[in-house]
């Protein structure tokens, strides 16, 4: 899995006036917590550094460089302004290489479905799956091969074969379905 570096600066004042001042300067207030560090660290980081972390379909491990202190973490939550969609706050969870972490990994569809060749429509039911494993074993994406899907059939989580990590999403959840268009439904009835 790819690693992205984010540089941060510690902040002492946690009141709302300080937070607004940080946001006005183009930075994002952040906090990192978890088993990888002794106590949580409040910091701020330039908003531009979050572009490759948040506005991408890829997932990344994050190496936080907070005034020289390196913390390995994952982005746990990002809060946005409800109207302008500006990033307001980011929560990171620190981890260690010897303890498993829970993370959401995107699904990548591979293969060509005979159902699509017959006029079916690929319908995504879920685009990310919740997984658990050691950080070094987590993949960049999970492949779902739809080569055997015909019209009206689904590819379920239970059909995946994870190696080195565990999928926490229920095995009965559909990842994709090959939908039958209305025009083809009428032909089947005849």
Image (tube, rainbow, N blue to C red):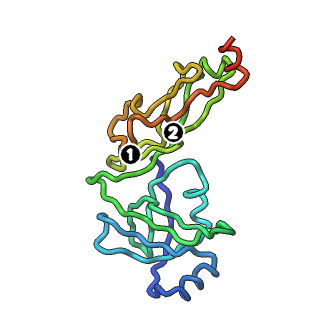
Residue at 61% x, 20% y: name it.
115
Vertical arrangement, residue 124 with respect to residue 5, above or below = above
Which image quadrant is residue 61 in? bottom left
Q: Earlier in the sequence, mark 1 or mark 2?
A: 2
Q: Position of residue 80 (x, y in %)?
A: 59, 67
Residue at 39% x, 63% y: name it.
93
Q: CA distance from mark 1 to mark 2?
A: 12 Å
Of all residues, the one furthest to the left in this rendering is 98
- The quadrant of the picture occupied by the C terminus is top right
Q: Position of residue 59 (x, y in %)?
A: 50, 50
Vertical arrangement, residue 28 with respect to residue 184, above or below = below
The disc placed on residue 122 is: none
Vertical arrangement, residue 171 with respect to residue 146, above or below = below
Of all residues, the one furthest to the right in this rendering is 183
Which image quadrant is residue 24 in? bottom right
Give yes or no for contact between labels 1 and 2 (Cβ–Cβ under 8 Å): no
Q: Position of residue 153 (x, y in %)?
A: 53, 24
Q: Secondary structure at mark 2?
A: strand
In the picture provided, is 175 more to the left or to the right than 72?
Answer: right
Q: How many residues crowd around disc 1 within 10 Å: few (fewer than 14), some, or many (20 or more)? A: some
The disc placed on residue 131 is: 1
Residue at 61% x, 60% y: name it.
51
Residue indicated by mark 2:
107
Q: How many residues crowd around disc 2 within 10 Å: few (fewer than 14), some, or many (20 or more)? A: some
Q: Secondary structure at mark 1?
A: strand
Which image quadrant is residue 164 in? top left
Closer to the camera, 115 or 56? 115
Residue at 53% x, 71% y: name it.
89
Q: Position of residue 119 (x, y in %)?
A: 69, 21
């Amino acid at each position: 899995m790819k690693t992205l570096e984010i540089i941060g600066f510690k902040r002492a004042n946690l009141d709302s006036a300080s937070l607004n001042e940080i946001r006005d300067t183009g930075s994002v207030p952040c906090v990192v917590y978890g088993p990888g560090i002794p106590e949580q660290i409040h910091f701020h980081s330039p908003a531009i550094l979050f572009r490759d972390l948040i506005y991408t379909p890829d997932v990344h491990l994050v190496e936080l460089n907070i005034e020289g202190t390196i913390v390995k973490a994952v982005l746990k939550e990002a809060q946005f302004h409800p109207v302008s969609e500006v990033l307001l706050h980011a929560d990171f969870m620190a981890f260690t290489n010897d303890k498993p972490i829970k993370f959401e990994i995107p699904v990548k569809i591979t293969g060509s479905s005979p159902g699509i060749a017959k006029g079916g429509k690929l319908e995504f039911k879920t685009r990310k799956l919740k997984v658990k494993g050691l950080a070094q074993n987590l993949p960049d994406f999970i492949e779902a091969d739809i080569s055997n899907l015909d019209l009206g059939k689904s590819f379920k989580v239970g059909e995946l074969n994870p190696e080195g990590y565990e999928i926490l999403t229920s095995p009965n959840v559909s990842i994709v379905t090959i939908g039958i268009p209305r025009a083809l439904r009428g032909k089947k009835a005849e």
